[in-house]
Image: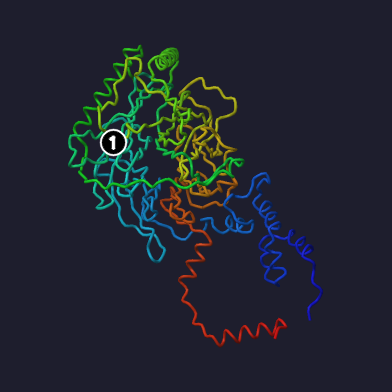
Amino acid sequence: MCGPVLPDSLVLEIFLRLPHDAVLRAGLTCRQWLAVSRDEFLWRELFYSYYRIPRSVPRHPAAVSWYREFKRLFDCIPCVEVQTLREHTDQVLHLAFSHRGHRFSSCSKDCTVKLWDTERPDGNISLVHSSSMRQFNWGYTQFSQFNADDSLLLVSGVYLGPHHSSSGEIAVISLENYTLLSRVRNKPYDVFGCWLNETHLISGNLHWIGNMTSCSVLWLNKAFQDIESENVNVVKRLFKIQNINASTIRTVMVAHCRRHDNPDLLLDYEAQSQARRQKGQQQQHHQPLLFDLATSGSEEEEEQEEEEECQRGARGHGLPSPRLPQPTMSGLEHELEIETQVAQLMGRAYTKPPDPSLSEPSESGEEDKTYLLFTTGSLTYSPHQIGIKRIRPEQMTTSGPVLGEERSSDEFFDSLDHVIDIHGHIIGMGLSPDHRYLYVNSRAWPAGCVISDPMSPPPIAEEIDLHVIDLKSLREERRSLRAHRAFTPNDECFFIFLDVSRDFVASGAEDKHGYIWDRHYNICLARLAHDDVVNSVAFSPADQELLLSASDDSTIKVWRSPRMIRLAQASARPPRPRSLLPSWLSRSKNSCINGKP
């Protein structure tokens, strides 16, 4: 015999005072409690209280209910360690997925680049190839990136050749047969390098034209040479940019801003109702004939010509003769101050004006744009600004003069189209999958600090700020994310790679953890433990519930969501044989227990 039934309103009041797991258990008691335990008002209250989200933040525009949104943040985060890869013998510095998500690469202080398979039937990740770069006199590999059709791998490393210690090199490896196709010099090595398109990559070079003044040159390189076009250049200069106060261009990456019609996420809450349009046409893929370039003899000639051009420009415009940067001494202070002033005057007088189309929209408003993004600075050698330079369609090929278009005497340098000051030491950058947002790891300077000596930057905070920059408006969105920490000083600061998926952003940290945030709600959802510094994280582009983390403990850890683990376990469990008679008897027994004939 059943007792009196509590009214739904009273049951709801009780459930509002329970934790979410108790509400779910109570919902199994009877049909009435089950219905109340799925109430939208109940789960909205549980959602905001459990995740401590300000109520001014609306629900994700793609969410269908508060209950499912709570479950998404609780159950779909890749926070459960399922595998540890120990094939590297030294610190693992970087991870990169292929665009299909079927492979990923890893770089390490052991000077190898390794390729891994993520599509094994048993769900485990396995090593498929390893290449050592020591034969090319590399110290270690530091960064890798798949091209758009996953046929080539760019590998960046620190080159320990007969050059200045800041030199690096970029290698291109065919993923069809793992052969080396080309090698490109890259200076300084923390330019890293990146793909511009399927067949061309960007590298850097640096020429000092004074104690504190230098010229960064960004080169477009063809990854290989087609047999049918042996007479076409394989390199072309893209930009030549003046650096002052010992700063240099580093960490280049390319953003393909395709009208921003289909953003993964709109961080501007007021504009969310205008999101979601149809996707544009997919890029067409081209598989060319391959030809091993190795290192051509003409590279030395081109670099020498480029060096001489920078020196002629410096002498012609009044800069002192070149000298590698040295620690500031009292006898040089006045000379360095004069050099900086002369360099600034030279920059204003002999630099091409910025591209007005970056800030002025086209008449149709539907023009695709490609931006080169990089870290730079103007006050000190530590990178504290994001530089943006538009790459025009005619610049995306190596055809034409090696040194680019003809320049007039008053356009010796290229200007930056836009600069965003971060007011701190930048230690990481990553693009959202739709290239709408740029996420930047930085360690802040003290508020109101004044830099009087470029070689003595301000102290940096231990807390890492994760800034979010909208590449459509070119401004920082909302407040920065914070949870992770770093401890090294300015002169020992190193890059911590982050990654962005459709819904989440993740980053490494020096506190022996990786971190995952939700992009919409701006909250930290998980900490991923290692035994040492976490240098890099990477989401699978095919499944954001798969995440990798790389550490100084020489391991790569594989993380999956609780939901995916349950699905894998259920599919691995053999199905139980079903009999119609026991099933019918079970239903009949349950009906009698519930008082139904």
- Residue 515: % across, % down: 53, 48
Colouring method of the image: rainbow
- Residue 532: % across, % down: 47, 48
Left or right: residue 28 versus residue 81 is: right
Query: 99 or 368, which is in the foreground?
Result: 368
Which residue is at 59% across, 45% downward? Answer: 273
Q: Relative to 221, is 338 above or below?
A: above
Residue 98 visible in this rendered orientation of the protein: yes
Quadrant where the image shows the C terminus = bottom right
Q: Give the farthest residue toward the right.
A: 4
> Which residue type carries mark 1?
Asn
Q: Name the secondary structure under disc 1.
A: strand
Residue indicated by mark 1: 221
Q: Relative to 479, is 578 above or below?
A: below
Query: 382 or 61, which is in the foreground?
Result: 61
Query: 22 or 164, which is in the foreground?
Result: 22
Quadrant where the image shows the N terminus = bottom right
Image label count: 1
